[in-house]
Amino acid sequence: MSATQNLIQAEPVSRKLPRRGASRRAKRILRRIPVWLSVTVLLVVVLYPMLWMILGSFKTQGEFFANPTWALPESLNFANYIEAFTRGNIALNYRNSLLVTIPSVVLIIFLGVAAGYALEIMVWKGRRPTLLLIMAGIMVPGQMILVPLFTAYFKLGITDSLLPMILTYTAMGIPLTTFLMAAYFRSVPRELFEAATMDGSSPLRSFFVIGIPMMKNAMLTIGLVQFFSVFNDLLIALTFTTRPDLATIQVGLLSLSDQYGGTNYGALFAAVSINIVALLIVFIFLNKKIMAGMAAGSVKG
Amino acid sequence: MSRVFGDRKTVLILLVPVLAVYGLLKVVPVLWSLGLSFFNGNTLRGFEFVGFDNFTTFFTDAPALNALWVTVYFAIIMTAAQVVMGYLLALMYVFVLRKGSAFLRTAVFFPMVLPTVAVAMLFKSFVAVGDNQGPVNDVINLFGGESVEFLATTSGTMTVAILMTLWSSMGFYAVLLYTGLLDIPDEVIESARIDGASGLRLVRHIVLPLSAPILLSSIIFSFNSTLKVFDSLLALNNGGPGTSTSPLTLYMYRTAFEYAEYGYGSTIALVLTLLCLVFTVTVFRSSAKRTED
């Protein structure tokens, strides 16, 4: 929006002096060359490593050594993918990741939106300190809570399940989500909720009938951000993976590389490529929301 | 009206679940961990109160000091690289490509959503696969150099870790700073242009001061995420060679969960938390001073 304004207003300045059209045009094109050159270099730097990985996932072990590393695969064979799925437990890892990520994100979002409403729309003594206490959690590193939580989960006897991960991710996602939800509620005109009260709606009813529908967009945006941060996490997953069959995809990738290390590139390339392609598909559809959400999540300082 | 929105029951219904989860799973563990840092031992062996011994141990423990150094070094280099690179990209988006920047913005951002573990696997292969040790060495060979085993040395591993983190995060910082640059009123830039400012001078005297707040947020955000670096250094080279590229996070993880030293592990976690606090406060203060001058 602002960019368009910028463009519209900047244009007259650059067109102010229309003298000697042809040579000016040539100069303009010449001036654009460094720009296109840097854009091309940038795109190659960003995209080539991923392309190289995906191409590599179709190579046989022999090709990795016989041909130069930049060579294209000789044929399109999916043997590496089959191996990654059958020997490397990738399917189970993905299942675990989703079983952990989806409940965590749903919990984070609903707890966060309720807290945002209670802290921003409701008026009560002590709401500022409560918000500050929750926000303080944004900075505390995960390492600070792992040892006590590990002990507590062990005493509760739930270490043999995915529950410790879900609980921990939920607790870790609350501070940022609450902070952002409170900010979103702040930007909504209060009169909306006050008018509903005039019509006889209780504040709790207003939360469900007006608050949640109005926050739908915000919930989706923050939900995406939390999805990526939970799905991509390694620390919590590694700590609470007490049995190999509880491993999420990140832990699975790590052990796949330990297991095969320098010996079997193909399966590792295939496993990483699945990640890249799956996230690329998600990103193509949701990039605007993801980018907006991630940027909003960090401008909290 | 205010009495309706002061309804206790509503506040309790909405807030108790959050406070229960947050209190039990975050606040209590933080305090618990704080307490543990004055003890030695673990749950099975029992705990023994040692006062400040863990802290004195920390400052004479060579691996711990190395981990502290790795963390600080990584955070400072990475923050400088991310913010400078992000700012350059953002300036390019806003002033050079203008409306045509959408595709590039999106493409350069994409690696940010990839799991750090996958990115580390990618770059590990990128400098180590095959007889030639990956495409990077192919380029080095092309210019007549010998293949370099990046992951065999500390400096090589750090270089790969820094480049790979920059690769995956620069697009994110660019978008963050880009939204900040868009907030600068167009009239301000226009009037500066009319006054004859252009190119570098426009950026230095007009754009840079006006984007100071968003730069500050980016620097703080960057420090807080890079001081907590864990996945990338673990997945890239297992904190090695040896433990030479293990940051505090990894050293804490190993101390607590591999050597079952819960007390000392908690002490390391506390040092890390304090480090984040110190960096944030320092950045805030230095910027506050500058605006006063």
Image: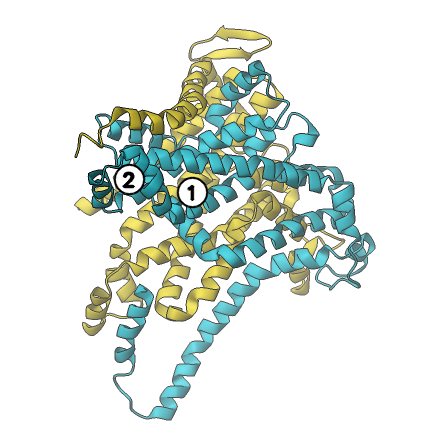
Chain colours: A cyan, B yellow
Q: Amino acid at mark 1?
A: Ile
Type of amino acid at the residue the image marks with label 2: Phe
- Please name which of the two marks, 2 or 1, marks the residue nearer to the observer: 2
- Looking at the image, residue B251 sits to the left or right of residue A140; the answer is right
Q: Is residue A186 above or below residue B69?
A: below
Please indicate, yes or no, whether residue A72 appears anywhere in the rendered image.
yes
Camera-nearest residue between A41 and A75: A75
Question: Mark 2 belongs to which subunit?
Answer: B
Q: Secondary structure at mark 1?
A: helix
Toward the viewer: B171 or A89? A89
Tell me residue B202's x, y (percent). 26, 66
Residue at x-position 38% and y-position 90%: A23
Give residue B145's quadrant in the image.
Answer: bottom right
Residue under the point 48% across and 37% down: A106
Q: Residues within 10 Å of mark 1 (few under 14, many from 20)?
A: some
Chain for mark 1?
Answer: B
Label 2: which residue?
B284
Q: Which residue is mark 1?
A: B76
Left or right position of A156 against A196: right
Q: Position of residue A146 (x, y in %)?
A: 51, 24
